[in-house]
Amino acid sequence: MPKAAASSSLTDTDHSIFSRKYYHVFLSFRGDDTRKGFIDHLYAELQRKGIVTFKDDQELKSGELIPEKLMKAIEESMFAIVVLSKNYASSSWCLNELHKIVESRHDLDRTVFPVFYDVDPSYVRHQKGSIAMAFKKHEATFAEEKIQSWREALAKVANLTGWETKNRNEVGLIGDITAAVWTQISIKLPSNFDYLLRIQRQANKLISLLKIDLDHKCFIGIWGMGGSGKTTLARVVYEAIQSKFEITCFLSNIRENLLVDSTCGLVDLQKKLLSCLHQKNIEIIDSYGGMRAIRHFFCNKKVLIVLDDVSHISQLENLAGNKDWFGDGSKIIVTTEDSHLLKTHGQFEKYEIETLNHYLALKLLCQKAFKQNNPEEGFVELSQKVVQHASGLPLALQVLGKFLCGRSQSEWRDMVDKMKKKQDLHKDILRKLRVSFDGLEDEEFKTIFLDIACFFNRKPEVFVMKVLENCGLHPTIGINVLIEKSLLSYISFKNGDRLLSMHNLLQEMGKNIVLQESPNDASRRSRLWSQEEIDQVLKGNNGTEKVQSMGLNLEQPHEANWHPDCFSKMRNLRLLFFRNVHLVQNSLNSLPSSLKVLIWEHYPLKALPQNIGQLYELVEITLCHSRIQNLWNGTPVLDKLKFIDLSHSKDLIETPDFSRVPNLESLILEGCINLVKIHESMGHLKKLVKLNLKDCRSLVNFPINKEMNSLEEFIHVGCSKLGNLLDNLGKSSTKPHRTSCFCCVSFANNHLKITPMGLKLPDSLLSLTSLRELNLSFCNLSDGSIPEGFNGLSSLEKLDLRGNNFTNLSDHDNDVISKLVNLKYLDLSNCAKLQSIPLLPPNLITASASFCPSMKPLQDVHHLFASPLSKNRSLLLHEGDITLLHVQGNAIPTWFQRRDDHFSSDEEGFGPRVSILVEIPFNQGQTNEWLRIGVCLAVNSREIRREKRIHWSYKAINNEEDERFCQGSEREFYIGNGLHSPNPHLYIAFIPFNTHNCWSNNLRGDDHGRQLVLSLRFNMHCDIKDYGWRLIYSS
């Protein structure tokens, strides 16, 4: 009876019990009985399946001592197939082999496969018939002790589960034997799969997608960046399932071994693929003939083919052009860094490979650096920093681990310091990562990649797209291509915003490419981003025509002693991107005429240089928080200028003459509190689409002209001296506008005119049942201004009530906020009289009540919601969602509990990361008893930033070897309308745990630990003063 077939999925048992073996299988047989038929066929099938097999007449050379060679081969084989035939026991060589096989194996039932060839198994087990006669003859020649050892070995093997050849089709029998052998081989994967636990999970997921047991044809493409483990994953899956297919082939390193335009190279690949048929005389002359041959020979066969590192569509078209090329049940697996190839082919399902989480990344690094799973003493912190640098990329972890193996702590510290400065990316990592960059066929795509790597990594997509487009590039297709090539990705937020994100090592590679343009002379590089090098070049006026872009994004002000003519030699400069750079000499004579985009936050001068009229290529001027008094004098010709942003430039008194800026589309003057006059030429800007005059409280005139017929968005809240602006504007345009008080997402054709001066909202507002976003900020609303029935706005998701005069919304307005069941975002910031948070609706994600000086201390946070959490479970708990509150205050409510020894905080990137150890009582580990973890942080902000984000994640700790991670999400805050307050604030997070949560099963049962490590990361510079946490139960 054959051994039971094992599942195709991988397990984590016995992966390290085998030292490296030379052979998979040792084949023991009596040649006179079986060699010319059954054994030859079995050996050929084993070889075809990739099972390395020792067979004596294939492996022994003339003159060698047979016993020594045989003994060594048995020791170097993982498994043995013993073909027991009628005359097997008559050969002393066979019996010696058998004794050595049994002697060298403790788990015979898993490593020895008996085949009873044309013999009754009971005769062999009981040593009857020809077996008994053979031993009788041996008694005349060999000692009794030797014969007894043979008898015992034969009995042990004969009692194992195996196969009988009687009444069996030979082809089917050989197929069963090879399948069983390969199943055992795949379970005992060799030790070079260092991070097998992670690969195992992904391999099982991929095997599930392949649907091995079904006859449908399946094409799957494994997609991810270089070095992410695509080939390893494909190899593990291939070896786990190949025994289930008639034909198998793994074509590795296709990109490396093939020039895309080489027809001969494609033919060579086709020949390799056809060679797995083991048929001679298959002649192909060209790639077309190869395609016909593949389809002809494979169309009726169940095949498993892996095409590794595919880089061009021609490779797929010539090797796996269509599913009808292959028989039922065939599976084609491709690995690639270019998802567009899979889309172009049209028949591949995409599987995106995952990078390693922190725990497995550390384990892989330690295996390479310390030959164990954990860091050695004194290397823990250094290892953590190396893992952080590698950002989950297996290639980087392996390369760095090998490089650091055996090195001292001081050498590790030097390496970490170089990583921090992003110097000298290891050549093996660089070579692997650069392949995708070099494969970009359009030079503009390379330009976009390098710009993002040097200046815009993890910046908002909308911002980056705008800057690149204004530089004359085509970012829509360029960024999509980079994403398809695994060189770029998105970080998405619940509100629809996205950041462009580049892996740390890809960013380092991009900067390295720029550095290699001129290793010793920064002035001759295309891009400059280092403060030290920019100062060096500009201080000495050493710029050259090589410099195309320059950027410094500084958190703190920098006093730069630059030469007044520092940009005069940079004839090809297209982008200046500065923040917090001040000029010691307070002088700048000129800017390059090639300049397309000028972004200089906190621009230090009173006006732009005198040569502004020569900047014929200029498309964008962004000078937020600048000292500008007058942007320019006279009427410079700026035909290409489309965007001007002077927001929060408090010294600006009047705008310049726009007469010769005919294509201006956007003018942002928000927060220019001393702006008195807008030049009359603005009324003639026919292409002006967006105008923002928010909080221009000194503005007394506004030129109105019917030529402004392109205006779509006009924001003027806070312009208290403009009087009847809305009425005048309504006569000037035929287009509807988004006004200062309302932002109507679903009602773009309705022109709502609301005067922001002590109003009560009209009842007609309640009919807008499809309204999703409502902005009522700074409209002088007070208690009673919100009408009854406000909850009729059933689709409302975002409500902005900043800067109004409410004292207590819940008492005076019938708890209308709590009845907005779809509301997700609520902002009550800068409401000076507000004393308490209103009852909150069930689906809320973010609420902010910062800069509310009359706010009373929070007491029982548990009752912030309109109804008990246990009754809101269906509405309140969203998989992966948290509810975040932000209020002014410094005292952690007593409702929360705290322990100093369970809290840690460290500065990382733009702000601190906070880790809190949450202990779950032993008898309350069932997640159906508790709904959320409430966490409260007291925070002092050290900067003035309107946009603030919090990223959260957590892991469950069951024991030292089992740390499970669950990635969370990010929440965005718009706090205080950019106003600054020295007072501390409270951030309160309610984190859900429900039956769909990835930890609901990890904290159950008596055998598991009772701890969670909760992490929150802020993208703002702040100090964490205090904290508290609490479990929230259904009761």
Image (spheres, rainbow, N blue to C red):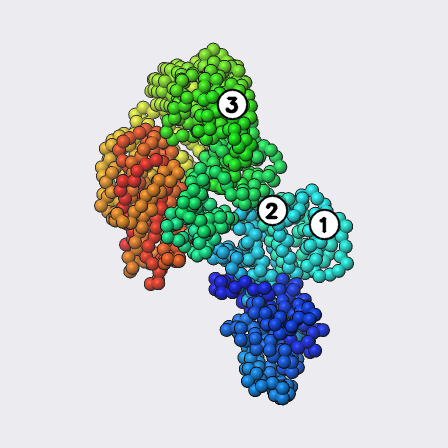
The quarter of the rendered structure image containing the C terminus is bottom left
- Residue corresponding to mark 2: 342
Q: How many labels were placed on the picture?
A: 3
- Residue corresponding to mark 1: 267
Q: Earlier in the sequence, mark 2 or mark 3?
A: 2
How many neighbours does mark 3 have within 10 angstroms: few (below 14), some (14-19), or many (20 or more)?
many
- Mark drawn on residue 693: none
Q: Position of residue 130 (x, y in %)?
A: 65, 86
Q: Is residue 951 above or below residue 60?
A: above
- Mark drawn on residue 543: 3
Q: Secondary structure at mark 3?
A: loop
Alpha carbon distance from label 2 to label 3: 45 Å
Q: Secondary structure at mark 1?
A: helix
How many neighbours does mark 1 have within 10 angstroms: few (below 14), some (14-19), or many (20 or more)?
many
Q: Secondary structure at mark 2?
A: helix
Q: Earlier in the sequence, mark 1 or mark 2?
A: 1
Q: Is residue 281 above or below residue 346?
A: below
Q: Residue at x 64, y 44 (%)?
A: 312
